[in-house]
Amino acid sequence: MTALAPGAAAQALSGTVTNTGTVHVTSVTATLTSIVGTPAGCSIADYVINNPVAAVNLDVADGASTTWSGPTIAMLNSGSNQDGCKNAVVNVSYTSS
């Protein structure tokens, strides 16, 4: 994702859940976990995930997959110099339940 900039439009997050057992998948939750490859002046607080929980609400058969979407990620405009975030790699983890 290359369009993250202070105050720019949020970017969509989406993916696929594959069931390795027989469970009812109710949601997928996106969480900011870390930032790597950045010089000083950039932190995880410079980013936000909006609507972090994507509803799935399906019985996904063993070995089957379904897609999800809904959460977005944005870079906040802090009002201070955020040049330290250029070329940052923002890691997002996903948990299904």
Image (cartoon, grey):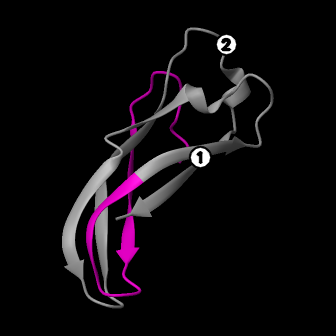
Residue type (three-letter) at the residue carrying disc 2? Asn
Disc 2 on helix, strand or loop? loop
Res. 24 image quadrant: bottom left
Mark 2 and mark 1 lie on one chain; the one further toward the N terminus is 1
Q: Mark 2 points at which residue?
A: 81
User: Which residue is at the far right?
Assistant: 39
**Between 11 and 95, the one nearer to me in the picture:** 95
Q: In the rendered view, would you say 47 is above or below 73?
A: above
Q: Name the residue under label 1.
A: 33
Q: Is the residue marked by circle 1 packed among few (<14), some (14-19), or many (20+) residues within 10 Å?
A: few
- In the figure, is residue 49 to the left or right of 58? right
Q: In the rendered view, would you say 96 is above or below 71?
A: below
**Between 79 and 48, the one nearer to me in the picture:** 48
Residue in the picture at 37% in, 70% down: 16
Q: In the rendered view, would you say 6 is above or below 86?
A: above
Q: Residue 38 at x, y = what percent? A: 76, 36
